[in-house]
Image (cartoon, rainbow, N blue to C red):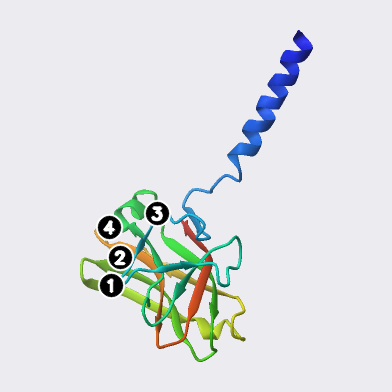
Amino acid sequence: MIHSCTKLLVLGIFLMIISCGKPQKEGYYFQDFENISQWFAEGATPQITNEIARSGEFCTKMDSLNPYSQSFAKKMSEIKAKGYKKVKVKVWGAISNTSARCKLVVSVNINDQVLFWNGIPFNQFVSKPNTWGLITTEVDLEKYPGDGHFKAYAIIDGKEKAYMDDVEIQFSK
């Protein structure tokens, strides 16, 4: 009887450990587009596709009909309340043509007023069509007020296609 209970206890602990998965770090957000919670549609309806995913089955796709990717947004008041001063954004991007005009955008806005906007071209980090390149940027958030919003997304201008997958956003103090 005790032997059976010990086996069940060990099995229960093992299942609990593996079911928890990898713990998320505080201030860290990851999106592989398998599940798009905490992300929203910017502009036209963004597409989730399985055409060329970097990991898993899905990524977000931008084209002339749907130029915006899924977007990450966080209130600056929430960021500042946790003492975060910087944010690092890493994105894996792919483009259908090396002349594609797709950008990773990071911004800070208050309502319709843009306080900060930076667009990093995918083609500076992607050397061949339909291959993945890592695009990174870092933003100092200290000088922006708490009533704004931080956003990260991708946008394309033109007829080409672009893809984004495995987005990492890390806030730091």
Tell whether 136 sits left or right of 113: right
Residue 41 locus on image (x, y percent): 34, 64
- Give the camera-side residue of 47 and 143: 47
Tell whether 53 sits left or right of 75: right
Q: CA distance from mark 2 to mark 3?
A: 22 Å
Q: Which residue is mark 4?
A: 146
- Residue at 26% from the left image edge and 73% from the top image edge: 114
Tell whether 56 sits left or right of 160: right
Residue 119 locus on image (x, y percent): 41, 79
Q: Which badge, 2 or 1, is on the more N-terminal residue?
A: 1
Q: Which badge, 4 or 1, is on the more N-terminal residue?
A: 1
Residue 107 locus on image (x, y percent): 35, 71
Check disc 1 and report its element: helix, strand or loop.
strand
Task: Say whether marks 2 and 1 touch (CB < 8 Å).
Answer: yes
Label 4 vs label 3, nearer the camera: 3
Q: Which residue is mark 3?
A: 38
